[in-house]
């Protein structure tokens, strides 16, 4: 079974000014002359982590990580102004141009898969391939599954804690109810809501409980941006048309894609990856037994690294 490559450090870091307000953090590691790959993180609002570099053979890949608007090392932190999906797609294209990359492999999980698919549909000639983990189609039904009705049936105890801060008469739309609290002028109310939001997601993300993931998600710096930005995007249905990704699947039909999904993913149920797979005639789908949503579950990690090794041979 494949495990992560050894730790590496970036050979270059950048703060890319993408407009009058936002600066995007990006870094390069691995082989400067290797196959360009863009790691597209989830959330939205999660930011990147050092282990994200380790899904790729550093001798074969030019590994590019970036923090999306408002999170990680990008500035200003937790900023919602001009923070929409079209802005993120424009940022990705600016990054490609800034780094003088002609074509790259996209590697994205969860919301990162959403953004990778949308970018590929907008710029199919710039995408050499797609490796997608925990595919999230960002339809209203997919948002409702996690934040209204669906995942709550698998985690009723954690759901009870998630819903508890919200009065009964507001629970018919928990995304909207949390939006009001995450937008509060009261710092304590805002942070309590952020931690409750992120705690719920962390509990759903792995097949076996992970204290490490829970502690990371509920760290005030992480939770403050992650909950606020996720809620902002899901309040606006991801700033895309309903079912946009599947409706425009023909635009990426020629791009090789590997879809990797945990059989017991309760954040993004496997139906989403299967629906995409059925829309892409040349895609591969790997449903990983004994795995949920997290990229660090052993079966998911194994399949992701096998996919990067396969593309390294294909794109060499």
Image (tube, rainbow, N blue to C red):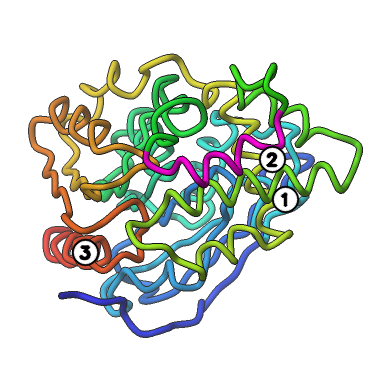
Give the magenta part as a residue range. 154-166
Secondary structure beneath disc 1?
Answer: helix
Q: Is 203 on the left-hand or right-hand side of 316? A: right
The first of marks 1 and 3 along the sequence is 1
The residue shown at (30%, 37%) is 269
Distance CA(mark 1)–CA(mark 3): 30 Å
The residue shown at (44%, 82%) is 8
**Quarter occupied by the N terminus:** bottom left
User: Is most of the magenta stretch helix, strand or loop?
Assistant: helix
- Foreground residue among 254 and 145: 145
The residue shown at (35%, 42%) is 266
Residue 162 lies in magenta, yes or no?
Answer: yes
Quickly name the residue at label 3: 299
Quickly name the residue at label 1: 224
Q: Few, some or many C-alpha atoms within 10 Å of disc 1 (few <14, some 14-19, many ≥20)?
A: many
Secondary structure beneath disc 2?
Answer: helix
**Quarter occupied by the C terminus:** bottom left
Residue 88 lies in magenta, yes or no?
Answer: no
């Amino acid at each position: 079974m494949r495990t992560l490559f050894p730790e590496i450090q970036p050979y270059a870091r950048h703060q890319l000014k993408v407009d009058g307000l936002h600066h995007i953090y990006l870094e390069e590691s691995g082989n400067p002359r290797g196959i360009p790959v863009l790691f597209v993180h989830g959330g939205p609002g999660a930011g990147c982590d050092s282990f994200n570099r380790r899904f790729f053979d550093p001798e074969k890949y030019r590994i590019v990580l970036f923090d999306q608007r408002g999170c990680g090392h990008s500035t200003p932190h937790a900023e919602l102004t001009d923070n929409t999906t079209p802005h993120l797609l424009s940022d990705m294209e600016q990054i490609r141009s800034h780094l003088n990359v002609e074509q790259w492999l996209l590697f994205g999980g969860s919301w990162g898969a959403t953004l990778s698919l949308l970018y590929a549909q907008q710029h199919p000639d710039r995408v050499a391939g797609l490796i997608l983990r925990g595919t999230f189609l960002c339809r209203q039904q997919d948002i409702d599954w996690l934040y209204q009705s669906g995942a709550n049936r698998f985690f009723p105890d954690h759901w009870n804690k998630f819903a508890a801060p919200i009065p009964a008469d507001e629970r018919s739309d928990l995304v909207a109810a949390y939006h009001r609290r995450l937008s509060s002028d009261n710092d304590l109310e805002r942070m309590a809501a952020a931690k409750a939001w992120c705690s719920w997601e962390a509990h759903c993300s792995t097949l076996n409980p992970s204290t490490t993931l829970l502690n990371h998600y509920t760290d005030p710096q992480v939770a403050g941006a992650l909950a606020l930005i996720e809620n902002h995007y899901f309040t606006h249905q991801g700033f895309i048309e309903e079912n946009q990704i599947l409706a425009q699947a023909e635009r990426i039909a020629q791009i090789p894609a590997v879809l990797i999904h945990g059989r017991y993913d309760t954040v993004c149920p496997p139906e989403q990856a299967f629906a995409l797979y059925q829309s892409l005639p040349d895609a591969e789908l790997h449903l990983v037994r004994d795995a949920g949503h997290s990229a660090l579950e052993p079966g998911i990690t194994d399949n992701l690294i096998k996919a990067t090794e396969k593309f390294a041979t294909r794109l060499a």
